[in-house]
Image (tube, helix red, strand yellow):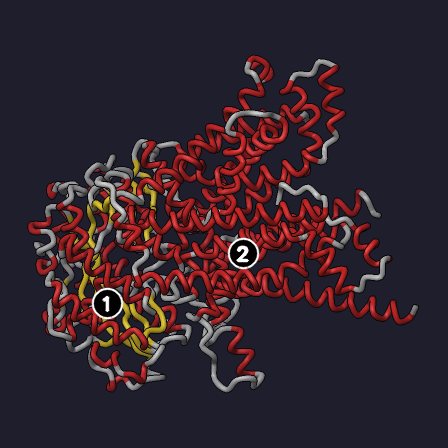
Amino acid sequence: MNALLAHINFRKLVITLTISWLGIFVLMPHLMVVGTSFLTHDSDHFASLPLTLENYRQVLDATYAGVFWNSLVLSGITTVIALLIGYPFAYLLSRMGRVSRTVLLFMMVIPFWTNSLIRIYAIKMLLGKKGLFNTVLVSTGIVDKPLQLLYTDFAVIFGLVYILLPFMVLPLMASFDKLDQSLIEAGRDLGANAFHRFSQIILPLTMPGIVAGCLIVFLPAMGMFYVADLLGGAKSLLLGNIIKNQFLVARDWPFGSAFSVFLIVLMGALLWVYYKANQYVQKKGGMDDQNL
Amino acid sequence: MTLNSLFRNATAAAALLVAAATQAANDKVVIYNWSEYVPEGVLEEFTEETGIEVEYNTYESNEVMYSKIKIQNAKGYDVIVPSSYYISKMAREGLLAKLDHSKLPNMDHLYGTLLDKPYDPGNQYSLPYTWGSTGIGINTDDIDKNSITGWKDLWDSKWENSLLLTDDVREVFQMALAVQGHSANTRDPQEIKQAFELLKKLMPNVLTFNSDAPREPYMAGDVSLGMIWNGEVIMAQEEMPEIQYIYPKEGVILWVDSFAIPANAENKDAAHKFINFMMRPDIAVRTVEYTGYATANKTAIRQLDPETRGNPTIFPTWEVINRGEFQEDVGDEATALFNQYWEELKAGM
Amino acid sequence: MTRTSKSRTFSGVFKWLFIGLVFLYLYLPMVILVTNSFNKSKYGHKWSGFSWKWYEKLWENDSMMQAFGHSLLIAGLAATAATLIGTLMALAIHRYKFPLKNTASSMLFVLMMSPDIVLAITFLIIFIALGIQLGFWSLLIAHITFCLPFVVITVYAQMKNMDPNVLEAAKDLGASESQMFRIIILPILAPAVLAGWLLSFTLSLDDVIISSFVTGPGFEILPIRVFSMVKVGVSPEVNALATILLVMSLTLIAVTTYLIKRQNPQ
């Protein structure tokens, strides 16, 4: 092993590995999806020539406007709620001792070791008419008859926030960790009240974390087809449901690819926003933040 | 322990694990089936008797199974269990291997009425495993059973936001087509469009689509009326006898799940042995008891206990069967049309 | 003085109340899983008595145990490989200048931000194009790839905090790049590498969407198994499995915490 390593130029090896892995398994397939989106549907070979814009015309069809809108709204609400829960949570955790903080972080991650699909099934039981929520609501007399919680947008959002919350918390924690306490102290000494310290110092400095967290929640939320299937009764469609159906059920790969390209473009736009937010902070706080 | 030796050990361990995970036994058969569709213990008995290792993989819909078979060029799996019309579709596309009937002596036990169907004349590609129907499920604690007689009743506006439909384009359209007196296997764009218009009116009544265990929402109390598979009702009745099954008067949706072998399967011999084993009457009896679906095995039906045999939810009367309709392949064009309308229905909700 | 301490306790109570509520949200579904794993009823919509039978059934259910074993295997291997490759990538991006470096880092961003569904189809398309059989290898490659950015970011952050003088000194003493990496960089990075591994392991075990696209014959993992329990619904054996996993991981944490606390009582 040592002899082997010595023989190969380590530097070259590392660079080749990086470029080839990302090239073969990330860049190339993404380009192929873009390419496929311009091909014609062919039920025998998945996709074939000639090149066409038909798939994009279909994507923009009025039928799917509702799905786009629905996806954006559900993901948007999910993101806001995850931020409202995740921000104070990350803040409190980042102020704790090393051990308790590590333990709590672990506690947050542990449920993920049981697969998220299994947890979504459990949420389904929680929200049903005979589920825990309704049992408590009815027995305490808050409502007289069980509410329809399951198979609603509420259930979908509940599930999406549940699955994605840690992805909001982790980048926020990174931001809070880097937050220079002395800046806040300085603000206090200069007579800034709690609200000002928050809005003028803490919030701008944690902006990259906020944007990163929102991105990493907002985009994936639109793809979580199994949450919409199980908790939304397969009718509050997300973009992910359409893409999955086009690939595995209707087998119209070019059309499914066109939808994915839409998501990729949206991602590009949002990454640009993230980049701008970073620049903004670097200018303002003089902090350097390349990572999430 | 230095990092270096740690690294070396980890690599060695990983290599071992990979070898263990990918090792191919000499004799094996890879089954690709609906989950829990084979009674407990049967796979182990098969291995004991024949020495052939079984690998059991599962899928959640015919479409997913078909896509995977197609993607892999009909290789990798040895036995699959497609429903009715998928047999003709897959056979036509060259995805299925012809069965060697001489290796399947147990097919003598099968019911003549379920053989030689239009989707597979002469049973060249498939042999029936179980069959069942899609009808109306009802919770008789909440709704008077006599008030519901046919599919048409589901359109009543009092069921707003409360029905369950299966998440299956052909089944849902078959319901609407039956109400309009058309065949489920129509290729006429006009008839399909009419059915679509009718279904649009049904959508406000729909609470959920479910093809992963439709009995669950009934048992959880979230749904009291809608579509359901008969076997699901049998399973639900173990705990909740109030969940019952109605054969709609317009005609029930019938389907057969059949064994088939993908064209480029690597263990065709073992696949034949497995199919033959599953057609043994004692195994077929256990299948009915385990899944709640009817068997295509006439010898097994005689061996069933009278209560199961006489259960109209499992074994419908001839009258019901004759009024019902099996799904057939309708060709790419009509399929695409069905799919397009289906997306529109769901997207419009 | 009293006022401050009173408001301290108040904010302390409030703080723990909030944290408690968040954990209630996270663990309520787990409580349901655990409860139902002991429920005699098959469908878990009502309590019909305590029973161990689902654990016994789980033990006898070879194919479920096998799928579970496969999941752990993929998660372990993918996490290890992703940590290895990701650490090297972080090193490349941090220390070296090379063509396409910007493209490489944007690819990592794309990987992290992309909805799973998009990654899933990109993987499916590339595997078909390259003629890779869907199954063990396709799953492993896909899982390694989607874990990579998380490792790179964790490790990269730690690298930036490293004192460059140490490396310069080592170079002056004649250390080769690979020696420097093994002897100096890796030990400093150890905590970040470990964190990256854990994160990858978690992501891999949790994944549903990508796995359901790139899975193939002969190698079934748990989420696919659960996803396809359609004709009969999800069996309570899955609850039992989830409970065992939960107990195992919580024990692991408790033991680790105890050890850390004992090591540095401060």
Q: Residue furthest right?
A: C1
- Quarter of the rendering containing residue B23: top left
Return the residue nearer the eye: A219 or A65. A65
Mark nearest the camera among 1 and 2 is 2
Which residue: 55% across, 25% down? C98
Kindly report the distance in space between the C-alpha atoms of the residues bearing marks 1 and 2: 34 Å
Image coords of residue A65 (percent x, y): 35, 62
The residue carrying pointer 2 sits among few (fewer than 14), some (14 to 19) or many (20 or more) residues within 10 Å by Cα, namely some
The residue at which mark 1 appears reads as B172
Q: Residue furthest front?
A: A283
Which residue: 19% across, 76% down? B248
Asked if residue A115 is positioned above or below residue C37 in the image, the reply reads above
- In the rendered image, which quarter contains the C terminus of chain B? bottom left
Image coords of residue C204 (percent x, y): 50, 45
Task: Determine the chain carrying the residue at label 1.
Answer: B
Asked if residue A182 is positioned above or below residue B177 in the image, the reply reads above
Which residue: 42% across, 44% down? C119
Q: Which numbered marker is on residue A164?
A: 2
Three-letter amino acid code at the position of disc 1: Val
* Side (left or right) of B90 relative to B116: right
Whether residue A130 is visible, yes or no, is: yes
Three-letter amino acid code at the position of disc 2: Leu
Return the residue nearer the eye: B276 or B179. B179
The residue carrying pointer 1 sits among few (fewer than 14), some (14 to 19) or many (20 or more) residues within 10 Å by Cα, namely many
* Side (left or right) of A270 relative to A42: right
* Side (left or right) of A51 relative to B25: left
Which residue: 57% across, 45% down? A275
* Side (left or right) of B256 relative to C148: left
- In the rendered image, which quarter contains the N terminus of chain B? top right
